[in-house]
């Protein structure tokens, strides 16, 4: 590396690159640290603007207020159900669509691929989708949070490219000579070799389900089916203060301070599960994306 950057101009360039990367790291990291510190700080200190980096007069009042809501654990449970089973459904649908499209001997491959790509640019719209959900009979059910988004065409394309780049056609032909059927080849050979892309797809789909908000507003009416995002929205709305309803200025400040702390606590509570899961799939992330990237 020293030989590659031995000239004065190269060293100056590397200094600017390093400074830029450190600056980018600070710009990304500071808001995260601030949100965490504000969620652990005393409400009066937050509203006074005294929190900059570390918690001021640390307290758990924000998290206590959030977890006192009886709907919260039910929201966690629902979001986990939607994320777990929804991600499994997404992976099954994605693999079953991508694997045939990756095989050279699949008749009509270009035609079906064209149909998939068309759906990325054109759709019936929100109202036809809602009517379809109603007619299928899954409105206000758990399936309404999973079936309408069971497949992502973009993820199918990435997975198809991964299969094409990773699994040689000769391996497929050799398995056929040995009497291996297509489905057996997929289960016994293709999937064990596709751990990186499956991990990446699971992360994509899982985060999407965990953060699902709009679909819940559209398709769910029963509170016992609400995901975490809807429950946290209700807590946040209930924490908002209307100054016209309170005459005492000190009371307004205290309540507003608590509302701000609750807001930051909600951000941490909603983000923590995804942050915990990410390190376990991070080692596959770059490899899966690079191999599955579009080529040609």
Image: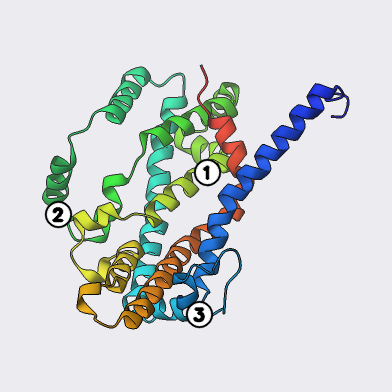
For the residue labelled by badge 2, is the local secondary structure a helix, a strand or a loop?
Answer: loop
Q: CA distance from mark 1 to mark 2?
A: 32 Å
**Residue 116 image offset from top left, x and y in percent:** 32, 28
Identify the residue under disc 2. 137
Identify the residue under disc 3. 60
Q: Quadrant of residue 264?
A: bottom left
- Mark 3 surroundings within 10 Å by alpha-carbon count, few (fewer than 14), some (14 through 19), many (20 or more): some
Instruction: Indicate which disc residue 22 carries.
Output: none
Is residue 259 in sight in this rendering?
yes
CB under 8 Å between discs 3 and 2: no
Identify the residue under disc 1. 200
Q: CA distance from mark 1 to mark 3?
A: 35 Å
Q: CA distance from mark 3 to mark 2?
A: 43 Å
User: Is tag 1's residue or tag 2's residue first in the polypeptide sequence?
Assistant: 2
**Residue 111, above or below 19:** above
Q: Residue at x 48, y 48 (%)?
A: 202
Nearer the viewer's eye, disc 1 or disc 2?
1
CB under 8 Å between discs 1 and 3: no
For the residue labelled by badge 1, is the local secondary structure a helix, a strand or a loop?
Answer: helix
Q: Residue at x 76, y 34 (%)?
A: 15
Nearer the viewer's eye, disc 3 or disc 2?
3
């Amino acid at each position: 590396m020293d030989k590659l950057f031995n000239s004065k101009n190269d060293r100056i360039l590397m200094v600017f690159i390093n400074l830029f990367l450190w600056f980018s790291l600070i710009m990304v990291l500071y808001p995260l640290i601030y949100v965490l510190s504000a969620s652990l700080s005393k409400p009066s200190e937050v509203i006074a603007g005294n929190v900059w980096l570390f918690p001021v007069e640390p307290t758990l009042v924000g998290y206590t207020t959030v977890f006192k809501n009886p709907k919260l654990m039910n929201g966690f449970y629902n979001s986990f159900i939607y994320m777990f089973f929804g991600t499994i459904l997404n992976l099954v649908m994605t693999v079953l669509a991508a694997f045939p499209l990756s095989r050279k001997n699949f008749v009509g491959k270009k035609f079906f691929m064209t149909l998939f790509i068309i759906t990325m640019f054109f759709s019936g719209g929100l109202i036809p989708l809602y009517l379809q959900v109603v007619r299928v009979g899954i409105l206000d059910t758990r399936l309404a949070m999973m079936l309408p988004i069971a497949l992502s065409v973009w993820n199918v394309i990435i997975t198809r490219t991964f299969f094409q780049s990773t699994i040689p056609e000769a391996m497929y032909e050799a398995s056929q000579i040995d009497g291996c059927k297509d489905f057996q080849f997929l289960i016994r050979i293709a999937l064990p070799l596709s751990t990186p892309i499956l991990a990446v797809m699971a992360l994509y789909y899982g985060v999407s389900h965990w953060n699902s908000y709009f679909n819940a507003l559209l398709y769910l009416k029963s509170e016992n089916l609400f995901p975490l995002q809807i429950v946290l929205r209700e807590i946040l709305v209930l924490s908002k203060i209307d100054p016209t309803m309170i005459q005492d200025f000190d009371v307004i400040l205290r309540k507003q301070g608590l509302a701000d702390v609750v807001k930051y606590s909600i951000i941490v509570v909603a983000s923590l599960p995804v942050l915990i899961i990410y390190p376990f799939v991070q080692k596959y992330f770059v490899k899966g994306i690079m191999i599955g990237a579009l080529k040609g």
